Image: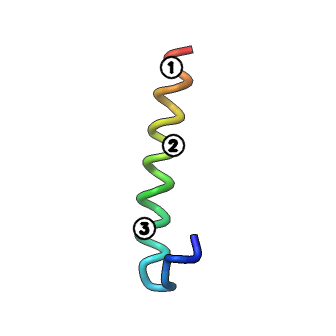
Amino acid sequence: MSYYDEESLSLCGVEDFLQVVAAYREFMQQR
């Protein structure tokens, strides 16, 4: 995550987090 600068950290971090959460929820539903 060192390639994020302070300004884009909030937006990119949130977008990446939402993508991870969405993928995790889909994975849990398939089990």
Would you name the residue on which mark 2 appears?
Answer: 21
Identify residue type, mark 2.
Val
Residue furthest front as drawn:
3
Identify residue type, mark 1.
Gln
- Quote the CA–CA distance across marks 2 and 1: 12 Å
Badge 3 density bin: few <14, some 14–19, many ≥20, Cα 10 Å: few
Which circle's residue, 1 or 3, is located before the other in the chain?
3
Measured along the vertical axis of the image, is residue 15 above or below residue 12? above
Which circle's residue, 2 or 1, is located before the other in the chain?
2
Measured along the vertical axis of the image, is residue 23 above or below residue 30? below
Would you name the residue on which mark 1 appears?
Answer: 29
Badge 1 density bin: few <14, some 14–19, many ≥20, Cα 10 Å: few
Residue 29 position in % (x across, y down)? 50, 19
Residue 15 position in % (x across, y down)? 41, 59
* Quadrant of the drawing holding the C terminus: top right
Q: Quadrant of residue 28?
A: top right
Are the residues flagged by discs 2 and 1 in contact, CB closer than 8 Å? no
Q: Which mark is residue 18?
A: none
Badge 2 density bin: few <14, some 14–19, many ≥20, Cα 10 Å: few
Which residue is located at x 50 percent, y 16 percent? 30
User: For numbered disc 3, what is the local secondary structure?
Assistant: helix
What is the basis of the colouring in this image? rainbow
Identify residue type, mark 3.
Cys
Would you name the residue on which mark 3 appears?
Answer: 12
Residue 8 position in % (x across, y down)? 42, 78
User: For numbered disc 2, what is the local secondary structure?
Assistant: helix
- Quote the CA–CA distance across marks 1 and 3: 26 Å
